[in-house]
Image (cartoon, helix red, strand yellow):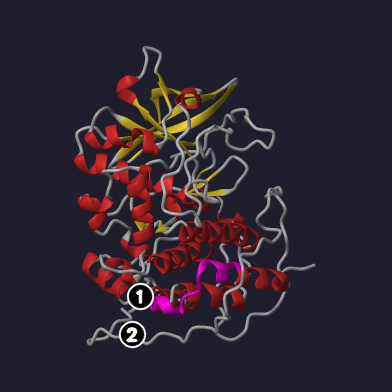
Amino acid sequence: MAHDGTHIIAAPIKSKPAALGAGGGLPQLDISRCLPPTAPLTPPEQPEPAAQAEATVVVDRSRVIGAGQYSTVCLGTLVAGAGRRACAIKIPHAGSLDARELGLIEAAALWQAGSAAQTVGCYGLVDLAALSARGVGAVRVWPAAAAQAIAGDGEWALVLELCEGGACWARMQAQRPGMDADLFFVWARQLATALAALEAAGMAHMDIKPHNLLLTADGHVRLADFTAARFSAQALEAMRLASPGFDPRAYPPYADFSGTVPYSAPEALTPASSSLHKADVFALGVTLYVLFVSGREPFATVKSAVEQMLLVSKGAFWEWEERHSIATLQSAADPHCTHTLPPPTPVDSHGTLTLPPPSPVEPPHPLSRSLSLGPKPLARRRTLKSRKAAPREFRRFLSGDLLPASVEALLRDMVNPDPDLRPDAAEILRVLDSIEAQVFEP
């Protein structure tokens, strides 16, 4: 089954609520919800009940801003001390056991992720069954609410950061000429930073796609919808210590494949796969290609679900896209061609592939922070150095600019069928720094 990112906002919200902090970020609630990556496996300290009581939320279920197979998202107002801020309330569908279990997995995942960079902010949970007559409820962190939520005592919903810019998929569909090299480096770096933080927390998202990437009001990307998240053994133990009685492995949705097939790495289709981080790297590579190069879903002309599954299991994304691009160019160049044939399936009768060799990967480098990551305004636009296309160089950004060979090589490496040959998030950041210094005009 494929989760559809039900806290994605269907359309950008025009009004911008006042920020609570001096930096205009999330309100500084006294809610400690993160196990640092290097922390020992001991439960994090829980805030005092009085501190928890300071955070409340006003839920307005009549103002629905998103809906999907397993949950509905409505607007809320977070109240912390003297400050108020708009937020999103993600409510699992009542009467659905899968929806409730997925909600528990996501709540625990967001707790484990803590304040991981570029992931959607989670303030805690609210029991909708205990709201006052005016729709006000206390915000509680996952360990404090876990026992009741696991037992089904109450109707628990997530209180999330409101991402007013909508989904990256909608942004791409509406502003294709704006999907240029400058924005590519901003988003790629922010998302690679998110993957590095999740890897340090011992977890993987496992459903990265344009529909699960949200934009803040100022254009920064947030990785959202953690219903398909998977955890390392150490992370599972940390979660058990924080919330006794909770084990996501006890829930059928956790054991099942929970991603979105066209974006998935081949090893992600295998439940016992241990390559969590590299599966996220593959999905990120596909996602960036879709958002900035193809502008359409992966394997768009493959109508058979069985054939699509076979292609994904062989890691055939790059080979298929190359054949599709060449076929499209040949069709456009032939004035007598009145139709476009789908490219031949890059899987022979023996189920083998001939894929291009990966570009060299240098040793890992410490996480980098370039000019593309800070709190600078995202309106800055840079110009690629002008050059002529080399033979067989035909890929372009949706903006029309020629895709630099170095960017193409990075994307190809990220979607390599062999997880051992893919770069990790730290290496992606290092490569982005190197490329960025070479491809733009000074």
Q: Position of residue 143 (x, y in %)?
A: 37, 38
Please state, as top left, top right, bottom left or bottom right, where the C terminus lies in the image.
bottom right
Membership of 404 in magenta stretch: no
Left or right of residue 239, residue 210 in this image: right
Q: Is residue 424 magenta?
A: yes
Establish if 45 lies above or below 36: above
Which residue reaches farthest right?
442
388 with respect to 352 (left or right): right
| 368 is higher (above) or lower (below) than 8 | below
Query: Of residues 441 and 204, which is closer to you in this image?
Result: 204
Residue 362 visible somewhere in the drawing: yes
Residue 225 visible to the viewer = no
Q: What's the residue at 43%, 43% (across, down)?
A: 8
Q: Is there a contact, CB below 8 Å, between mark 1 and mark 2?
A: yes
Q: Is 245 left or right of 294, judged from the image as shown?
A: left
Amino acid at pointer 1: Gly
